[in-house]
Amino acid sequence: MAAEVEVLEGTVLNILEQESLKWVFVGGKGGVGKTTCSSILSILLAQVRQSVLVISTDPAHNLSDAFQQRFTKIPTLVHGFSNLYAMEVDPKMEEDNLSDEGLEGFLSELTNAIPGVDEAMSFAEMLKLVQTMDYSVIVFDTAPTGHTLRLLQFPSTLEKGLEKVMALKNRFGGLFSQATRLFGLGDEFNEDAMLGKLEGMKDVIEQVNKQFKDPDLTTFVCVCIPEFLSLYETERLVQELTKFEIDAHNIIINQVLFDEEAVESKLLKARIQMQQKYIDQFYLLYDDFHITKLPLLPEEVCGVEALRKLSQHFVTPYKSSLARGTVEEVQQRISTLRLQLEEAELELERLQKGKEEA
């Protein structure tokens, strides 16, 4: 029975099996492999869902690098798939597109006066767009932790901003009307148009906020590495998610060194011991989470084939190919040492030859 629990905890199958999920956020500290994990999650979801959209809200935009395909703010079909789309969005991009005149210019100025509302509004616009596209599930490859938490605060940020706008409208409503006539802005700048736009935005945000807080519709996957700072950041992230009432029950620990890979390196042995200490802490702190461990790879994970290859460790827990102290493991160690000795002898031979010629 214990073995079954261990298998369950070591995979993301719970996410793949939860058919009601609409939003999957992937987040964590910078440089821990969030983009790789969100790309693989979207590939796995594409196998079991009708249509999947993976969105990068990280200004660094590594999604194009992961899939080795150029993505823009328009959803693009990923090569080799019929139901997986990807897009890259700069949370502030909408602001640049706003015209400096009339209603749009006024809104732009207004949002700049309320911290975070510009991002909240562009995020609302993006969600509005995404909702009309009708994807079965949407995977967010989020920016590093700080930005992610801001993104989750957007609903309340925008709501506060709208309250300020409504208060201003109530106090200076007549003045707005006079100003529009005075500057000849006409109907484009009427109160109804402005309030309609803001109210529409508020409706989207409220609707999405409700969805984000529904564990049947939304879940957050924390990606980390087995080091102190990453453990600390994950703890902070989980606490914030709890505060925002956002469901989280999956942690992916990336770049794990497994014992048989160390051979005879003292440095790697020391790293394995250090990592194990933090892995134990993860299991202690998050005993009710599904913890997936991914191996540190000798090469970068780029392109669909490499992503597919690594995806097997998301559904089947990674196991060391050899156990320490077995006959097979010692034989492999001996053959590796023989190979290293042969290489060293060849190098010595080359050096001696070069010395004689000199």
Image (tube, rainbow, N blue to C red):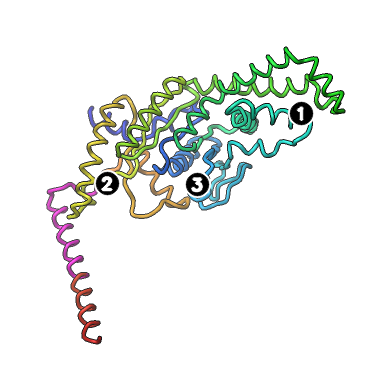
Q: Which mark is residue 257?
A: 2
Comparing 78 with 285, the one in front is: 285
Q: Which quadrant of the structure image shows residue 72? A: top right
Magenta part mainly helix, strand or loop? Answer: helix
**Does label 2 or label 3 sit earlier along the sequence?**
3
Tell me residue 140's x, y (percent). 51, 35
At x 77% / y 15%, what residue is drawn?
Answer: 173
Magenta segment includes 84: no
Q: Which quadrant of the structure image shows residue 341? A: bottom left
**Secondary structure under the numbered disc 2 in the rendered image:** loop
In the rendered structure, which segment of residues is drawn in magenta? Answer: 320-343
Tell me residue 319's x, y (percent). 26, 43
The residue identified by callout 3 is 62
Q: Which mark is residue 207?
A: none
Q: Nearer the viewer, mark 3 or mark 1?
A: 1
**Secondary structure under the numbered disc 1 in the rendered image:** helix
As measured in the structure, the alpha-carbon distance from the residue carrying label 3 to the one carrying label 1 is 35 Å
At x 58% / y 40%, what residue is drawn?
Answer: 90
Residue 54 showing in the rendered view: no
Residue 284 showing in the rendered view: yes
As measured in the structure, the alpha-carbon distance from the residue carrying label 2 to the one carrying label 3 is 24 Å
Comparing 11 with 272, the one in front is: 272
Q: Relative to residue 54, is residue 252 drawn left or right?
A: left
At x 44% / y 34%, what residue is drawn?
Answer: 145
The residue identified by callout 1 is 103
At x 80% / y 25%, what residue is drawn?
Answer: 189
Q: Amino acid at mark 1?
A: Leu
